[in-house]
Amino acid sequence: MKLKCVRRWVFLFLTIPLLAKAYNLDEIVLRLKEEGRKVQRLKMQFFQERRSPNGKVSKLQGTIWLERPNGFRMEVLPPYESITVIKSDELWIYFPKEKMVQRVKLSKDPTLARWVNFLQEPWEEIRKKGTLEGKEGNRFVIRIETSSDFEDLSFIRVWVDEKLWLPVKVFMKEKSGEEATIMYSKFELNPDFPPTLFDLNLPADVQVTEL
């Protein structure tokens, strides 16, 4: 899995709960602050489908754990098995089958650092570039223009469940023409996490690459 793919994952899976009512944008930003800060820990399942410009489809799924302000763990199931964690100033991606780890210092990667900063407190970016497009059933649809800040993406669209106040679907349009849709389910709000959840216990023979 390339680093830029991990950047997309980080963005998609750390998106904070948005809104339960169709307010104006200023009210959305205020509500986003209030509701986002209530969820200190989150566990959820995800299913992703990616479609290339030539129509090729790839699918993967797994589990995500999130603890504010910067605890993140994502486990992707086989055949694309990997474990990604963010702890302090570092992002680690472990591929068990290949016995390989990629380690990234956020301070040395400005683009990835911008992703993390945006995901920790997204309300200002939504205030500047978010648009409430409407409602589909019990889901509010919000579009975020990202083309000027994130080199790979044209825009992101988020579907927010009116009862959960959580994103249950995310669509990304990339500048390359690729599209990705993520579905979230089985949410657990503020569950207890083991203290070692965001640690990455590696075998002695693993190969570590710094990017």
Image: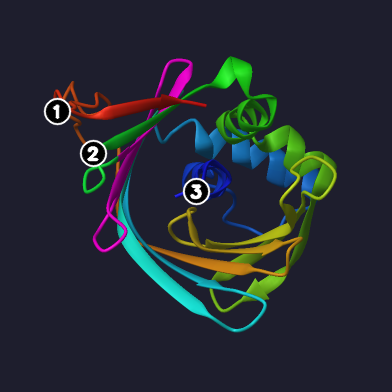
**Reading the chain from its start, which is encountered first: label 3 or label 1?**
3
Mark 2 nearby-residue class (10 Å; few <14, some 14–19, many ≥20): some
**Residue 166 % position (x, y):** 48, 53
What type is the residue that disc 2 sits on? Lys
Counting residues from the N terminus, which is met first, the one under dot 3 or under dot 2? 3
The residue that disc 2 covers is: 99
Give the SS element for disc 2. Answer: loop
Residue 78: in magenta span: yes
Q: Secondary structure at mark 3?
A: helix
Picture disc at residue 203: 1
Q: Are marks 1 and 2 in contact (CB under 8 Å)?
A: yes
Q: Which residues are magenta?
A: 73-94
For disc 1, the neighbor class at 10 Å (few under 14, some 14 to 19, many from 20) is few
Tag 1, which secondary structure?
loop
Q: Amino acid at mark 1?
A: Pro
Whether pointer 3 and pointer 1 mark residues with C-beta atoms closer than 8 Å, the reply is no
Q: Residue at x 67, y 77 (%)?
A: 53
Q: How many neighbours does mark 3 have within 10 angstroms: few (below 14), some (14-19), or many (20 or more)?
A: some
Mostly what secondary structure, the magenta segment? strand
Image-quadrant location for residue 65: top left
148, 193: nearer the viewer: 148
Q: Is residue 68 left or right of residue 12?
A: left
* Disc 3 to disc 2, C-alpha distance: 21 Å
Tell me the residue at 61%/17% (across/down): 108
The answer to whether residue 67 shows anywhere in this view is no
Identify residue for label 3. 9
**Side of 10 where 199 appears, left or right:** left
